Every structure is written in structure tokens, then in C-alpha cells.
Amino acid sequence: MAAPTGRDIVLELPSDIRSIERTVEYVMLRCRDCRAQARRLDLNFRVGLTEALSNAMLYGNGHDPCKRVKVEITVANGRLQARVTDQGNGFDPTAVPDPTEPANVSKPCGRGLFLMRSLLDEVWYNDRGNQVTLVLRLDPGDALEGGIPA
């Protein structure tokens, strides 16, 4: 893992799902001063980031141990933002079936995207489809407003 730059977190990870839990715990620890958002941070952000990392490693990078996943965490303008970028070819998120539709309930795809969209305030992808940005809006008086503590 790379060291944080300034008050943001920037990490480069191998496409190894065993690194997900350690990475998410590191980010959560660095965001521990976010007391006003503790529940949403610990559930919503944690689950969303975990899903984004697993999708990047498993689907984006296709389990290729030579490919990396970049994670950028920023706190600014009342938002905690995570950007996850893989080295894959990307995909069209609008083409992924809605897992809540009766015809798709038994299909294994789309659940992670559904969780991210349900738990985070904003989720968007770059045009290529190999980068997802997750946003959790923070309360105005939140301790993290000035950035992630060193």
C-alpha cells in the first residue's frame, strides 16, 4: 500500500481479494474522527467500498495478479469520496440487470452495484467504466470536514 498524500488517502492494491478487508479497515481507521456519521460510515461506506474493491479486482481486473487497483479517498465540500479504478477494459453499468427484478433474482450479477447505489448518496462511473466514484455526504459540522486526520 502506498502512503497517504497530504490529508487524502491514495492506495495501489494488487488484484488480490485478501487485501480488501485490510484496506477497508485502514480507511475506516483513518476516518474514525467522523463521529457524527459513525453509523453511515461503518455500514454504508464500508459496504460500498468493499463492493467497489471486489468488483474492480474480480470483474475489472479479471483476477489478474499483475493488474492493480487504485483507491483514492478524499474529504472535501461536506463529502467523503472514494474513487476506485481498475486496469480492466471497463463495462457499461446501465447494461447490468437490476437484481431486484423478478426475472433477475436468481442471477448472480448486479447485487454489488445495487448495494453501492442503495447505500451511498452518489455513485457514478467514468465513460470507460473502469472507475467508480462513491460519495457519502457528511453533516456540516462533521470532524472530518477539514480532511482525513494524519
Image (spheres, grey):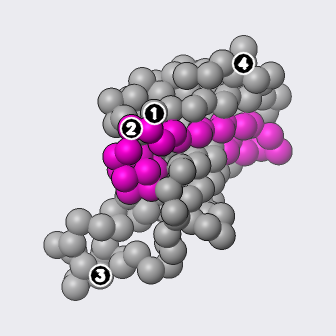
Q: Which residue is under mark 1? A: 14
User: Is 75 placed above or below 113 here?
Assistant: above
Name the residue tied to disc 3.
101
Image quarter in which the C terminus is found: top right
Residue 108: x percent and y percent? Answer: 23, 66
Q: Are marks 1 and 2 in contact (CB under 8 Å)?
A: yes
Residue beneath the point at 82% across and 28% down: 146
Q: Residue at x 59, y 38 (%)?
A: 71
Magenta span contains residue 23: no
Q: How many marks?
A: 4
For marks 2 and 4, give the one nearer the viewer: 2
State left or right for residue 135 relative to residue 68: right
Q: In this picture, which residue range is highlighted in magenta?
A: 56-81
N-terminal-most mark, 4 or 3:
3
Which numbered tag is attached to residue 149?
Answer: 4
Q: CA distance from mark 1 to mark 4?
A: 25 Å
Q: Which residue is mark 2?
A: 65
Task: Name the kind of residue labelled 4 in the image.
Answer: Pro
CB-based contact (under 8 Å), mark 1 and mark 4? no
Q: Secondary structure at mark 4?
A: loop
Q: Earlier in the sequence, mark 1 or mark 4?
A: 1
